[in-house]
Amino acid sequence: MTWTSADIPDLGGRVAVVTGGNGGLGLQSVLALAGAGAHVVVAARNHDKAAAATDVVRGRHPGASLEVVELDLADLASVRAAADAVLSGHAAVDLLLNNAGLMAPPEGSTVDGFETTLGVDHLGHFALTAHLLPALLAAPAARVVTVTSIARFMGAPLDPADPHLRRGYGAWHAYGQAKMANYHFGLGLQQRFAAAGAPAASLLAHPGLSDTDLQATTASSGGAGPAADTFVTLTRRVGMSPPVGARPQLRAATDPAARGGQMYGPLLAGGGRAVRRPILRRWDLQRRVTELWDVSERETGVVLDVGAAMAARG
């Protein structure tokens, strides 16, 4: 059976936070979650575009419960402020969908000096998740869904001695490294939830080949070379539509049968119905997860300690 957004159960009374909810797969996720009754926090860098996106959602679902929080994942101060805004309005958060991301931009740095792709796609989400832990742990069964990509195979696990690729930058390598970091983060977070006995789960999703504005943005930025134009053409011809491409992350977020540590993606990797996908490369998984955690806490100065957060709740 093909899983669609029509299979999402009633989410009335639930609070969901979606990063990058103003376009692409993020907007499709907001549409589906709000349509199922959730109160959705649209966390995005451009407030005006996010507000316009909420108008689109309300046009489809007039009774949608929405709010906008400004979030620039390339600035840890903005991440902290966004988390504070969410925490001030919500004692519990039932779903955090770490969806936003960049793909193969020119070499650059975030406000805090991180390599741009790693900073936005992983380190910003790492810090946001850590800051929102009190609200996630206050929910009866929260889920954190982190969006990775099959492009993780284009890179390599980050080098703790050079996570920002200062010894040699390649746009596609940086993207692959960041998506591998997302993969290890989602699995590592589940380990920590389980070890602490937390009432929360961490899952992964990847959208396969989905035709969104991500590819065009990559091509226009000029950092990814001629391959970017080829990628745009390919996705326009054979890529899944945004509503279909969003199904894996929505299934990970809402399917009652989904469990922590699982990953959802298209059946045929690049396309197809949203199904559970295998967790690969287990032989060095624990080492890579531990290295990622150490680097993430070192670089951001933010500690993501589920056990300590559980103890603080009493």
Image (cartoon, rainbow, N blue to C red):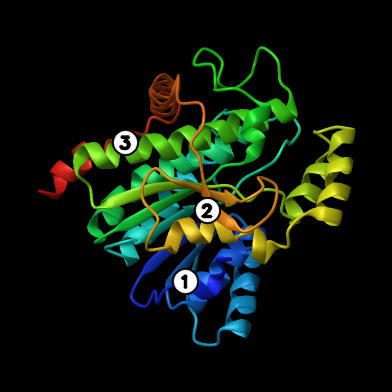
- Cα distance in 3D space between marks 1 and 2: 27 Å
Q: Find residue 22 and report its image quarter.
A: bottom right
Of pointers 3 and 2, the one earlier in the residue sequence:
2
Left or right: 175, with 81 as reference point: right
Quickly name the residue at label 3.
Answer: 191
Residue 139 seen by the camera: yes
Q: Which mark is residue 8?
A: 1
The amino acid beneath tag 3 is Gln
Q: Position of residue 277 (x, y in %)?
A: 53, 45
**Which residue is at 57% across, 28% downward?**
113
Q: Residues within 10 Å of mark 3 (few under 14, many from 20)?
A: some
From the viewer's perspective, is residue 262 above or below residue 44? above
Which quadrant of the rendered structure holds the N terminus?
A: bottom right
Of pointers 1 and 2, the one earlier in the residue sequence:
1
The amino acid beneath tag 2 is Leu
Q: Find residue 82 and report its image quarter.
A: bottom left
Q: Nearer the viewer, mark 1 or mark 2?
A: 1
Of pointers 1 and 3, the one earlier in the residue sequence:
1
Q: Residues within 10 Å of mark 1 (few under 14, many from 20)?
A: some
Quickly name the residue at label 2.
Answer: 71
**Which residue is at 81% across, 33% downward?**
224
**Which residue is at 40% across, 55% downward?**
258
Mark 3 secondary-structure assignment: helix
Left or right: 285, with 247 as reference point: left
**Residue lying furthest left in this view?**
314
Mark 2 secondary-structure assignment: loop
- Cα distance in 3D space between marks 1 and 3: 26 Å
Q: Position of residue 174 (x, y in %)?
A: 66, 28
